[in-house]
Amino acid sequence: MAQNAHPSPSDLKDLQARELDAICVNESTLKHPWWYNLKYSAWGILFGIVFVKAEIISWFRIQEMFRFESFHMYGVIGTAVMVGLISVLVIKRTKARTIYGEAIHIPNKEFNKGQIYGGLMFGLGWAITGACPGPLFAQVGAGFGVVIITFLSAVAGTYAYGVVRDKLPH
Amino acid sequence: MLDTLKHPWPWYVAGTLIGLTVPYLLLVGNKTFGISSSLRHLCAACIPGDVKFFKYDWKKEAWNLFFVGGIALGAFIGATLLADPEPVQLAAPTAEYLASKGITDTSRLMPPEIFSWSNLFSLRGLVFFVIGGFMVGFGTRYAGGCTSGHAIMGLSSLQWPSLVATVMFMVGGIAMTWFILPYLLTL
């Protein structure tokens, strides 16, 4: 929810549309030129290097994880959650603000049945493709060309969800 | 130095850097970490059609597309400048099992026996690329997030629906790996 200002009715409608089933919706009253977004690209580059160098994008590592035959992926995800948890705690405690002085806001995720059915479906697909959405981008970038087909299928899946969304149990 | 970087990075280095994404995105722009939404923004930008779910101002979420663009570029750097010449050091039981299914080439991060263009128009390609990808795209959106949005961002901010989603990701992955994939690997 927007907290920074009183959005106009049309802005609010737009925000509500974007917020449907999304955890990462952000409303800022700041207007910046496009190249301010490059700071996200910069972190993305670091992220992509980590994905490849820690072999997180490897289909093999995903098989190991789901077969409980390696600690590697559990170590990666577990450490990431711990670091994230501590960071969020510190940000909340210190009431830290963004570098532009905005109050930091973490939206709450509401429960719906999609987290069960959709989560199960994603898990099944994850073990087949060896990729969650982030690694899909990274696998293509790392030169596994045919993953473009997997990626386009994932876009198609997202689109199909948007089409049938109202008919699904939530 | 470069040699160290070329070897596979340990889990605690990778986990720490991935975890730091959470405060980085919050501090530089009040953004919450999540990657699967980028697929939705791509739909909204390219093929919104007449679907309500894709009718919103995707430009307000453009940061997410810049982020995933960076991931692809970073992966390219990781696979070229920092490429590891050694094959993937797979756990012995996993390697043994996969070998029994005819998957033996661990020289790269993805097995060429599956992820090759030559499989595109085969049953194997249909399952591993098209159906698998579709389930990832549909499932993450239905669940409202993926490993980043739920397992990392959601758990970091103590949201119990994200714990439900994360458990279901694991249940789905384990069920596929143990009960279905053994058959799919024979396709």
Image (cartoon, coloured by chain):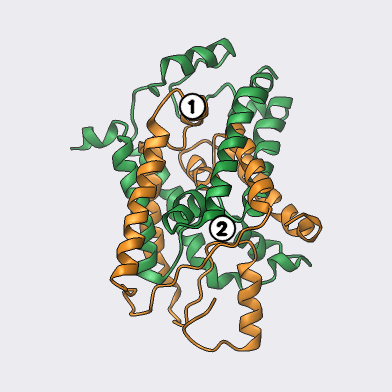
Left or right: B74 in relation to A149: left
Q: Is residue B115 above or below residue A51?
A: above
Q: Which residue is mark 1?
A: A60
Q: Is residue A165 above or below residue B87?
A: below
Q: Which residue is mark 2?
A: B38
Query: In terms of secondary structure, where does tag 1 sit?
Result: helix
Colour of chain A in the rendered structure image: orange
Q: Chain of mark 1?
A: A
**Relative depth, front residue between A10 and A110:** A110
Q: Amino acid at mark 2?
A: Ser
Q: Position of residue B39 (x, y in %)?
A: 60, 55
**Relative depth, front residue between B114 and B139:** B139
Chain the render paints green: B
Q: Are marks 2 and 1 on the same chain?
A: no
User: Can residue A146 be seen here?
Assistant: no
Q: Chain of mark 2?
A: B
Within 10 Å of disc 1 (Cα), the crowding (few <14, some 14-19, many 20+) is many
The residue sitting at 54% across, 43% down in the picture is A136
The residue sitting at 33% across, 36% down in the picture is B11
Left or right: A61 in relation to A23: left
